[in-house]
Amino acid sequence: MNYDNWKLMSPDDEGCSMVSRCCGGEYVESIDNENDIETIEDYVCCECQDYCDIIEDYEYQEIQRENYLEDMRDE
């Protein structure tokens, strides 16, 4: 990629980033050396220090928007 194309890129051109489902924060992979099987609890949220699922950042924003609109309907 040349410099001119890089300058004109939008953040969406790079793809989306993954965030934790619980609070939209960064996550780390939990390391389980005893068992090499995949479990649901493979990721730990850096914000709340709990096991979490990960989703793409635009999905998290959409969930938060839907929650906000639902809360506004209740008032």
Image (cartoon, rainbow, N blue to C red):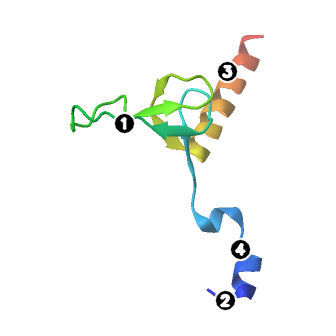
Q: Amino acid at mark 4?
A: Met
Q: Nearer the viewer, mark 2 or mark 4?
A: 2
Mark 1: few/some/many CA within 10 Å (<14, 14-19, 20+): few
Q: Which residue is mark 1?
A: 31
Counting residues from the start of the chain, the first of labels 3 and 1 encountered is 1
Left or right: 22 in relation to 54: right
Left or right: 6 in relation to 24: right
Counting residues from the start of the chain, the first of labels 4 and 1 encountered is 4
Disc 2 and disc 4 in contact, CB within 8 angstroms = no
What residue is rendered at 46% in x and 28% in y?
A: 52
Counting residues from the start of the chain, the first of labels 1 and 2 encountered is 2
Q: Is residue 4 above or below residue 39?
A: below
Q: Amino acid at mark 1?
A: Ile
Q: Amino acid at mark 2?
A: Asn
What residue is rendered at 55% in x and 23% in y?
A: 49
Q: Which residue is mark 2?
A: 2
The residue tagged with tag 4: helix, strand or loop? loop
Q: Which residue is mark 4?
A: 9
Q: Position of residue 69 (x, y in %)?
A: 71, 26
Q: Which residue is mark 3?
A: 70
- The residues bearing labels 4 and 1 have C-alpha atoms spaced at a distance of 35 Å
Q: Give the quarter of the image for residue 71.
A: top right
Front residue of this view, candidates 5 and 34: 34
> Which quadrant is the N terminus positioned in?
bottom right
